[in-house]
Image: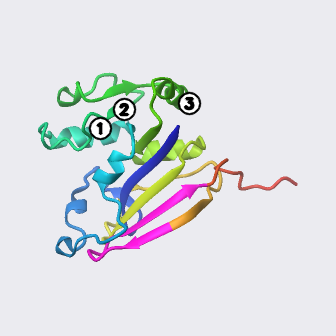
Amino acid sequence: MKCSAYIAASVDGFIARPDGSIDWLQTAGNPEAGVGEGYIDFETYIASVDCMIMGRKCMDIISSFDLSPEQWPYGALKIVVLSNTVQTPPDNLKDKVKMYSGDLTVLLDELERDGYRSAYIDGGATIQNFINLGRLNEITITQMPILIGDGAPLFGSTLGDVDLIDAQAVVCPNDYIQFRYRIKKGQPKSRHSAA
């Protein structure tokens, strides 16, 4: 199964404020200028996947938006939420997400058996887990033109070095920069060479 991430980060590498707020995503950049050619917007990206695996913190943020059916950005996409502590989704997401606690490899095997082929991986810790398992194939990072100073980092500690290949970058008129990478197979690799 192909697993990819699509995420925004501040120039200083954060995906949320310390309290989990992502309000700065709405204010960074020059919205009147547009994104320009080559930028992959969220709707285009979502149309390229057939399921989504997110962390519980992502679910909590989405739940806090209390979106109407018309505002729901994921359509009929199958969404699995990873949590070892929460077993029931919030009331406003009960019919939209399935909770999962367990081995990620088992989850991916189950999704593949059910016919899913391309998973959107969302949430800092979840992306990190997929990188450490060597299961993230691609990542698209939209760097927002803002420094927020502190918060949840885009990347945490990896089990080893992770080589990113086939780099692409789009500099947008609104001052966003979107980077796309494939992750070299077999990642992460040990930082220590054999003696």
Query: How far apart are the two marked residues, 3 and 1, measured between alpha carbons?
Result: 21 Å
Secondary structure mostly seen in the magenta stretch = strand
- Magenta-tinted stretch: 168-183
Mark 2 nearby-residue class (10 Å; few <14, some 14–19, many ≥20): many
**Label 2 element class:** strand
Q: Residue 194, can we see it?
A: yes
Residue 81 got which mark? 2
In the picture, measured across the screen, residue 123 lies left or right of residue 113, that is left
In the picture, measured across the screen, residue 150 lies left or right of residue 180, that is left
Q: Residue 155, can we see it?
A: no
> Which residue matches tag 3?
105
The verdict on residue 176 being magenta is: yes
x and y percent of residue 131 in the render? 55, 47
> Which residue matches tag 1?
59
Mark 1 nearby-residue class (10 Å; few <14, some 14–19, many ≥20): many
Residue 50 got which mark? none
- The residue most toward the right is 195
Query: How far apart are the two marked residues, 2 and 1, measured between alpha carbons?
Result: 7 Å
What residue do we see at 19% from left, 70% from top?
31
x and y percent of residue 36 in the render? 29, 72
Mark 1 belongs to which amino acid? Met
Q: Given contact means CB atoms under 8 Å apart, are the residues at marks 2 and 1 in contact?
A: yes
Query: Compared to 103, does 18 lie above or below?
Result: below
Query: How far apart are the two marked residues, 3 and 2, measured between alpha carbons?
Result: 15 Å
What residue do we see at 24% from left, 68% from top?
28
The verdict on residue 96 being magenta is: no
**Label 3 element class:** helix
Mark 2 belongs to which amino acid? Val
